[in-house]
Amino acid sequence: MRHLLRVSCFSSFIILLTGSIYLQSCSADVKKADDEKAKYVISDSLFKILKIDTVNQCQLVNAITLTGQVDYNQDNEVKIFPMISGNVQNVKVALGDYVKQGQVLGVITSSEMAGYSKDLSTAEANVQVTKKNLEATQEMAKSGLSSQLDVLAAQTAYDQAQSELNRSNRVINVNGGSKDGEYIIKAPISGFVVDKSITNNMTIRSDNATGLFTISDLKNVWVWANVYESDIDKVHMGDDVVITTLSYPGKIFKGKVDKVMNVLDPTNKVMKIRVVLPNEDYALKPQMFASVTVTSKVNSDAICVASSAVIFDNSQNYVLLFKSDSDVQIKPVQIINAIGDRTYISSGVLPGDKLIASQALQIYGALNN
């Protein structure tokens, strides 16, 4: 009986010892896995292109996002209307073309222009005739064959003929400058052809209310945004504006509210505000849709970080706290709002902390794996 008891006790001891060794082995494996996970090191090639952002204390900014649309700057837009009636010939430009001031856009053959050319020819002939008559009268006056009254009459006739010639030239210049019976359509300013309503062989009339061409200088454009009644008190003259478009999702355009219409559209019940944006590279096109975020500062501070440093995952926002290439920590943060390239947060990091602001999603994935 004692022998059996000893064997049983020895067996229990062996089982307990085996279990203890197994638990220690598992614990060692878990610790080893944790150590390996904690030992993630940013590679030298990745570290060279990383952007490190410093957490700052900033003045809190409120923001409201509106729908908007790019439009021509109507102060730098010219509509070309027909000065005469006739048939359109030789249209030289198409919609969207860039033209220079004075460039020929098209030609209109017109009986009116033929009449103006005839008047000019007649006026030129009259000037020549009256000039010769004046010279002859002046010579005769020297010989006593004509009186000073005759000279005065000849001078008056010459002056009238010269005045009529000047008038005819002005009429020709106003109507395109051609003396061949054609109306030459020229660009009054340099810019883009943003509207075109004529084609070759088209007949037009001078009382036509539709312009032939519209030319606009797109070096700066207007962006109109719609403000609903409930948001009118949130926008003001001079407020900063951040604009994004579908065409350039990663590009931010910045401006200020420079006009508030102060009346509601009777159909849409919205008030329009206007932003003027420089457009030297012609990236913004008229009729392009835009997202317009109007910001205004408030009398309180908040922690702000680069928007590129914030990662959204599993319904939570995170940032990567950087201490060294081998010490990067994932920190959850609470966001107040995000405006363009800056995000305002209420907790999670402190001013002076260093955050990874580029390649953040890649490093976040590596840390989680």
Image: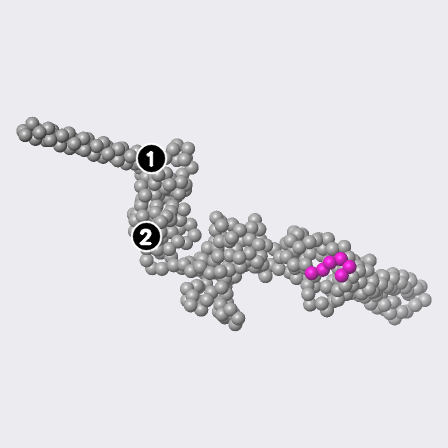
Q: Residue furthest front?
A: 1
Is residue 299 visible to us here? yes
Query: Residue 73, image x and y in percent?
Result: 57, 59
Of 352 and 367, the residue lying toward us: 367
Badge 2: residue crowd in 10 Å (few <14, some 14–19, many ≥20)? some
Which residue shows up at 75% across the image and 64% down it?
204
Residue 355, placed above or below residue 239: above
Residue on which the image places disc 2: 334
Which numbered circle lies on residue 40? 1
Q: Total number of numbered labels? A: 2
Q: Which residues are magenta?
A: 197-202
The amino acid type of the residue labelled 1 equals: Tyr
Query: Residue 92, image x and y in percent?
Result: 73, 53
* Magenta span includes 201: yes
* Magenta span includes 273: no
Q: Residue furthest top?
A: 3
Of 114 and 60, the residue lying toward us: 60
Badge 1: residue crowd in 10 Å (few <14, some 14–19, many ≥20)? some
Of 225 and 31, the residue lying toward us: 31
Left or right placement of residue 280 versus residue 142 in this view: left
Left or right placement of residue 305 versus residue 179 in this view: left
Foreground label between 1 and 2: 1
The amino acid type of the residue labelled 2 equals: Gln
> Which quadrant holds residue 168?
bottom right
